[in-house]
Amino acid sequence: MSAVETAREVRAQAKYVRMSPRKARLVAEHIRGRSVPEARAVLAFTSREAAGVLQKVLQSAVSNAEANHGIAEEQLYVKTTYVDGGPVMKRWRARARGRVARIRKRTCHITVTLAERPQASPDVEPVRAEAVEAVKPKRAPARKKTAAASKKKTASKRPAKKREAAK
């Protein structure tokens, strides 16, 4: 029996979604690494069409976790989300002078993987804030400029004519 407990993973997939994978990836990036309740809140307030589809896939993954593994929703987080390209439906549209313009109607496959949050071991002590601060290297104090050094810099920046006029 090993001391390290492996996290259980649950997956849900939506295939052949009539949406561009590029547009769906923009929304998928927002929920990656978040807890399930937080991911639901983000998707609820995202105004893109892909948010609705991702919300359904997330709900399916949560249902799979509860039904198949008995894991509560609060213990889950979004481990990975990725959007792969699916088959492209090719259509055409008539253009001027007997030409044709191709229209590509893209599809995608959306996958959401949930994992159980790892439980902290009771025998491991948490790191104290004082210990972390002691490890940080001290920064050297900034040197103060002397009055003569600051006058030299300002004097050298002036044009020669103005310096003579100032005297």
Image: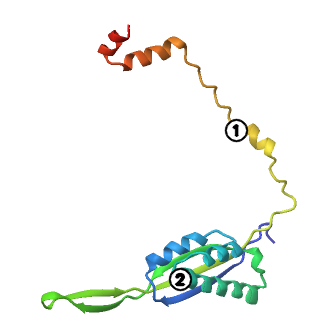
What residue appears at the point 75 percent right and 90 percent down from the top-left corner? Answer: 67
For the residue pair 98 and 121, the one nearer the viewer reads as 98
The C terminus: image quadrant: top left
Q: Is residue 150 left or right of residue 143?
A: left
* Quadrant hosting residue 56: bottom right
Task: Tell me how the rendering is colored.
Answer: rainbow
Q: CA distance from mark 1 to mark 2?
A: 43 Å
Residue 49: x, y in percent? 51, 82
Residue identifier under label 1: 136
What residue appears at the point 57 percent right and 70 percent down from the top-left corner? Answer: 30
* Quadrant hosting residue 62: bottom right
Task: Spot the residue most to the right.
Answer: 123
For the residue pair 58 and 117, the one nearer the viewer reads as 58
Q: Earlier in the sequence, mark 1 or mark 2?
A: 2
Task: Spot the residue most to the top.
Answer: 167
Q: Amino acid at mark 1?
A: Lys
What residue appears at the point 12 percent right and 88 percent down from the top-left corner? Answer: 97
Q: Are marks 1 and 2 in contact (CB under 8 Å)?
A: no
* Quadrant hosting residue 42: bottom right
Q: Is residue 140 left or right of residue 105?
A: right
Residue identifier under label 2: 110
- Image vertical order of residue 37 relative to residue 161, above or below: below
Q: Amino acid at mark 2?
A: Ile
> In what element is the residue under mark 2?
strand
What residue appears at the point 32 percent right and 91 percent down from the top-left corner? Answer: 90
> In what element is the residue under mark 1?
loop
